[in-house]
Amino acid sequence: MIRTGQQYLDSLSPDRQIWIDGARVRDVTVHPQFAPVVALRARIHDLAHEAATRDVMTYTDPETGERHAVANKPPVGPQDWHDKGAAVDAVLDAARGVVTRVGDETVGEMWSLLDCLGRLDDLDPRFTDNIRRHLARTVTDDLFHVSANTDVKGDRSKRPQDQDPDLVLRVVRETDSGVVVRGAKYETAAAYADQAFTKPTVADWGGAERSDHAVGFVVDMNAPGLKFICRTGFAGRAAAEDYPLSHRVDEIDTLVVFDDVHIPWEDVLYYRHTEAADLVRSTLHRYSALPFTYRNLRLADLMIGAALWNVKQTGLEHRPAVQEKLARLACYREGIHAHLTAAIALGTESPGGLFMPQQSLLYSGRVLAGAQLPQMMHLARELCGGQICLTPDAAAFDDPDIGGWLDKYYTVNDSWVADDRRKLLAFARDLLNSDHAGHRLTFQLFAQSPPFAQLGAVYRSFDWDGPLDLVRDAAGLSDRVLGEKRE
């Protein structure tokens, strides 16, 4: 059943061991750095119940008559992806900014398991029913589901087994009821999520077919032994009037320490087979890359809107040099849109029977969105001008001694008074120039693997045979080269 926001808040156990800024957090629902994003995640549940957004956020299962979240529905056709896009838009409208790890992006990793199910069953049939049950739960239980991929790395020139083995999460012992795991993972939103799909990142197995590090499972975030060590948040550092995005949409990243955490056998999805770990990792983003990249559309629109309002309020929007820069931002936005639209239009049925976006277009769109983002942010800074780093904060505008001067110098005309200009400049500063803006840039570059791995996904999904055949025929190459092509 669809949960309410209050039911989600009630699921966050006060017994969780959460730390931020060196202090224990007893209640994330009221802590100043957690409360805004936790309230937003609760709001997502409530949007599913409200008349204005209910039909966008949910669908009715034709077999059971139950309503479920559109975000959690495994896609079986192109319309499912369009429906998911509309649901993401509704969430981002409510957020008035960009949030990524709120469930719809990370749940797609579970669908990838369905595509791997045949081979996983061959390797170890003990866990096949577990996978099917957890896939069903992602649909029916309306849980806030996140992803646990990234390890703490250690010495990356060495294999996990050649250094402190706890640097990469591993099984330390088996029991009749499950396995006990130790190690750590970086997980965005973990401290206020319900569960996480936990699995290895890319690893050098040294040719071994079995490894205690090759384990995948779903963990309840209220499980004993979990410790959540969070980076400092951006909310609450300064007035919300001056940093609106930092205050509204900061998603707290967390080092989750597994201090001998017991994972019941029924929650284990694969175990010890390095081939299983590699297979799951290679298919992990075939669905989740779409809602992840879709966020860049909203980010591009925010940059375009902030830049265009800034040039309009100073009367520069008709200058060719300004229009050229705005057009470049538009090309970036439309390039992402084109890749996503084409990936859905040319999608195919996956091995597990789902509707899979065309992989080469999807991964290429993800690379375009991430690789060009730094340049686009800088372009938007140029258009916004130097005032985004020079304008005083809201308190100065309200001060009776100096507010009059600021009102005089920040008012342009009857349409653009000082208060609106201050709000616009504060928003642009937080979007492009703040600590939160820098964090968002790095997050978009790395959150679905580093750039080299994203390009590796393009390499593996692109159809190289087409260009090879084209040049073979155009150059008149002999049939002898066919053997080299096949290699």
Image: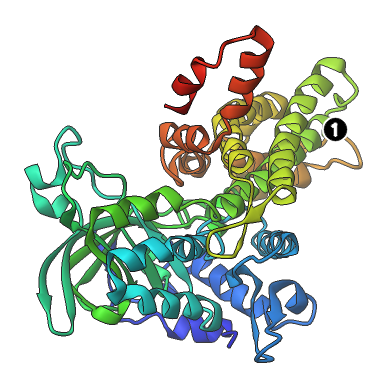
| Residue plotted at (80% across, 29% down) | 311
- Residue occupying image coordinates x 17% and y 74%: 179
Q: Is residue 227 above or below residue 405?
A: below
Instruction: Let me know if residue 258 appears in the view.
Output: yes
- The residue pinned by badge 1 equals 312
What percent of the width, then of the height, locates residue 425? 68, 39
Q: In the rendered image, which quarter is residue 329 located in?
A: top right
Q: Is residue 202 left or right of residue 168?
A: right
Q: Position of residue 389 (x, y in %)?
A: 58, 31
Q: Residue at x 53, y 51 (%)?
A: 286
Q: Position of residue 238 (x, y in %)?
A: 49, 51
Q: Secondary structure at mark 1?
A: helix
- Quadrant housing the N terminus: bottom right
Residue type at the position of mark 1: Lys
- Left or right: where does residue 359 sit relative to residue 338? left
Picture quadrant where residue 124 is located: bottom left
Relative to 195, residue 168 above or below: above
Residue 49, x across and y down, in percent: 69, 83
User: Is residue 260 in view from this perspective?
Assistant: no
| Front one among 117 and 294 | 117
